[in-house]
Structures are given as C-alpha cells and as structure tokens.
Image (cartoon, rainbow, N blue to C red):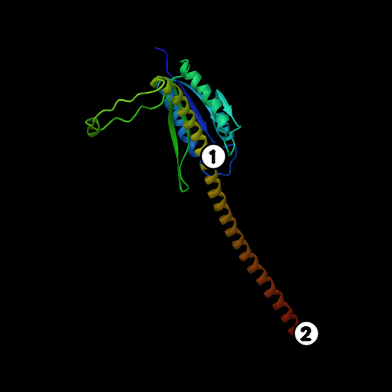
C-alpha cells in the first residue's frame, strides 16, 4: 500500500514582538512534523507567516508552499483559495489528511496551541446508551441527503479553516498587547531606576561643590 500523504499547515505571524506566540506554535509543529514522518507518511509542509518560514529554513526543512499575505485581518476569499486546493487534492486522492498547527483562541485571557485534523471531517459523536434507547426519527431530505452533504461538507471545512486563521490573528494581537505592556512597564522601571541614580549622583556632586566653596571661604578668613 502507498504511504499516507498528510498536509501540515503551520500558521504563524509575519512580525515579531509578540512574546512566545510563534515559539509555542513552532514547538508543537516540529513535533507533529516528525511524528508524521515517523509513522511512515509523506508530509507536505505548508507555512503561513515569515516566522514559520524562517524557523523551518533554519532547521533545514524545505517547505512545499509558503504564504505571507495573511495579515492581521484574514479575508475569507483568501482562505477559500487554500481550502479549495486542499479539497481538490483530497477528493482526487492526492492527500489523505490535512492537519493545521495554530494558536486557538479560547478567551481574552487564554489561548492555546492546537494541532487539528480538518480533513477528513470528524464523524458525529457516538450516542450514549440512554440516547440509543430513545425513539429513532426518520428525516426526509430535499433534494437528497447526499446532495446536501456535498454542499455542506466543503462549506464546513472552509469555515473551520477560516476560523483557524481568525483565531491565530486574534491570539497574535493579544500576545503582542501583553508583550508590549510588559515591555512598557519594564522600561518605566528602568527609567525610574536611572533617574534615581542620576539624582543621587547630582546631589552628591552639588554637596561636594558646596563643601569646596565653604572650605575655600574658610581658608580666606
């Protein structure tokens, strides 16, 4: 049997000054990349963001495709182009799985790195025993269940991929805000320390000069 082919998309930022945001994603991404290869699969590596590109270049790992046009406000039409490409490759059998490594937004105070499988789409959760005992209901679909799925599944994949980019953008801005706040507070602390040292040195110099003047006046008497 042919080896599995897996796309690993890593979403990082184009700019720095956002603390450990990129580092956290890249640590998980390189672990996932190596795990895919260890499992005997062929990994197609795709990178979004200059920081991811620089990191894997430093690791001497060549990317199959790179993106640098996703900025602070990702557009759906841009993400849709990437999603359509993955869907086409998946349906043609060129790839078997799509994994995305990115920062997942949970709340303004909490974000976490996530490596998610977006293709194939996950199945419905299994019913519990209590749920299985309930009365089953038959539904009618128009035009047909298959036709509805043919439209819904690609749309679902596109929305999930777009959410990955949106989560990444929001998390990046939060990380940058926190980092800049910490940098500002550190700078304020340094300014206070230096100002205090300067004032003490100036006070000592003035005291010395006054003492010299008094000493000179006393000598003249």
- Specify the quadrant that holds the C terminus: bottom right
Q: Is residue 162 above or below residue 177?
A: above
Tell me the element at label 1. Answer: helix
Question: x, y (%) of residue 114?
Answer: 44, 36
- Specify the quadrant that holds the N terminus: top left
Residue 25 - label: none
Can residue 60 be seen at all in this image of the molecule?
no
Q: CA distance from mark 1 to mark 2?
A: 76 Å
Residue 40 is left or right of residue 178, and the answer is: left
Question: x, y (%) of residue 174?
Answer: 52, 46
Question: Which quadrant holds residue 72?
Answer: top right
The residue located at (74%, 79%) in the rendering is: 213
Question: x, y (%) of residue 163?
Answer: 49, 35
The residue located at (68%, 71%) in the rendering is: 205
Within 10 Å of the Cα at label 2, are there few (<14), some (14-19), or many (20+) other Cα atoms? few
* Residue at the disc numbered 1: 169
* Residue at the disc numbered 2: 220
Of the two numbered discs 1 and 2 on the same chain, state the one appearing first in sequence.
1
Q: Nearer the viewer, mark 1 or mark 2?
A: 1
Question: Is 127 or 66 nearer to us in this picture?
Answer: 127
Tell me the element at label 2. Answer: helix
Question: x, y (%) of residue 33?
Answer: 46, 27
Question: Is 164 or 31 nearer to us in this picture?
Answer: 164
């Amino acid at each position: 049997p042919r080896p599995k082919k897996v796309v690993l998309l890593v979403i990082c930022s184009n700019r720095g000054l956002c603390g450990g945001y990129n580092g956290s994603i890249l640590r998980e991404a390189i672990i996932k990349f190596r795990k895919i290869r260890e499992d005997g699969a062929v990994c197609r590596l795709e990178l979004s963001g200059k920081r991811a590109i620089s990191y894997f270049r430093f690791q001497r790992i060549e990317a199959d495709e790179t993106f640098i046009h996703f900025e602070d406000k990702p557009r759906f039409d841009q993400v849709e182009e990437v999603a359509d490409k993955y869907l086409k490759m998946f349906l043609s059998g060129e790839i078997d799985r799509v994994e995305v490594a990115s920062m997942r937004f949970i709340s303004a105070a909490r974000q976490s790195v996530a490596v998610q499988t977006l293709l194939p789409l996950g199945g419905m959760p299994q019913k519990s025993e209590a749920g299985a005992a309930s009365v089953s209901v038959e539904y009618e679909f128009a035009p047909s269940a298959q036709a509805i799925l043919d439209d819904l599944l690609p749309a679902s994949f596109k929305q999930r991929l777009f959410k990955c980019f949106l989560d990444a953008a929001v998390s990046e801005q939060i990380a940058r805000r926190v980092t800049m706040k910490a940098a500002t507070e550190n700078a304020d602390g340094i300014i206070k320390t230096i100002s205090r040292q300067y004032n003490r040195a100036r006070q000592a110099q003035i005291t010395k000069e006054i003492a010299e003047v008094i000493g000179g006046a006393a000598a003249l008497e």
